[in-house]
Image (cartoon, rainbow, N blue to C red):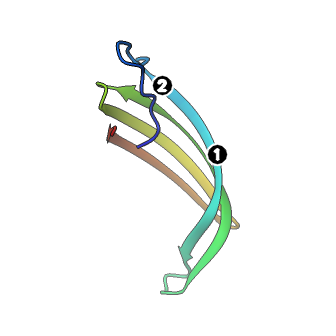
Amino acid sequence: LGNGLAPPPGTTAPAVQPWIGAGLGAYAFILDDENITDTRPGGQISTGLLVPLSRRFDVLAELRYAAAEDARIFSYTLGLGVRF
């Protein structure tokens, strides 16, 4: 939710809507395969494509890389979005 553009009535959205993003946050980790968790500050960058199917539905693809001290996370998302 929130990644797409809602075009004005009577117009259509672009066929493909690319984006890039960056952010800061707190990341929680399980240390050494135990139930000990730690939370550390980190940052993330992301990029993706949003393909509108209609005024209410989208297909979304996103790549995200996050880093917090020694931990690195690479993730991807592919999904169907609904606008309200």
Q: Is residue 70 left or right of residue 52?
A: right
Residue to which mark 1 is pinned? 22
Mark 1 or mark 2: name the one nearer the start of the chain. 2
Residue type beneath disc 2: Gln
x and y percentages locating residue 57 in the rendered image: 29, 32
CA gap, disc 1 and disc 2: 17 Å
Give the crowd class for mark 1: few <14, some 14-19, many >=20 residues within 10 Å.
few
Q: Is residue 52 above or below residue 29?
A: above
Q: Is residue 68 left or right of residue 55?
A: right
For the residue pair 71 and 5, the one nearer the viewer reads as: 5
x and y percentages locating residue 40 in the rendered image: 66, 71
For the residue pair 3 and 19, the one nearer the viewer reads as: 3
Q: Which mark is residue 39?
A: none
Residue to which mark 2 is pinned? 17
x and y percentages locating residue 44 in the rendered image: 62, 52
Secondary structure beneath dot 2 equals: strand
Secondary structure beneath dot 1 equals: strand
For the residue pair 4 and 76, the one nearer the viewer reads as: 4
Q: Is residue 7 above or below residue 59?
A: above
Q: Tell me the residue at 55%/32% (across/down).
A: 19
Quadrant housing residue 14: top left
* Contact (Cβ within 8 Å) of mark 1 with mark 2: no
x and y percentages locating residue 58 in the rendered image: 33, 32
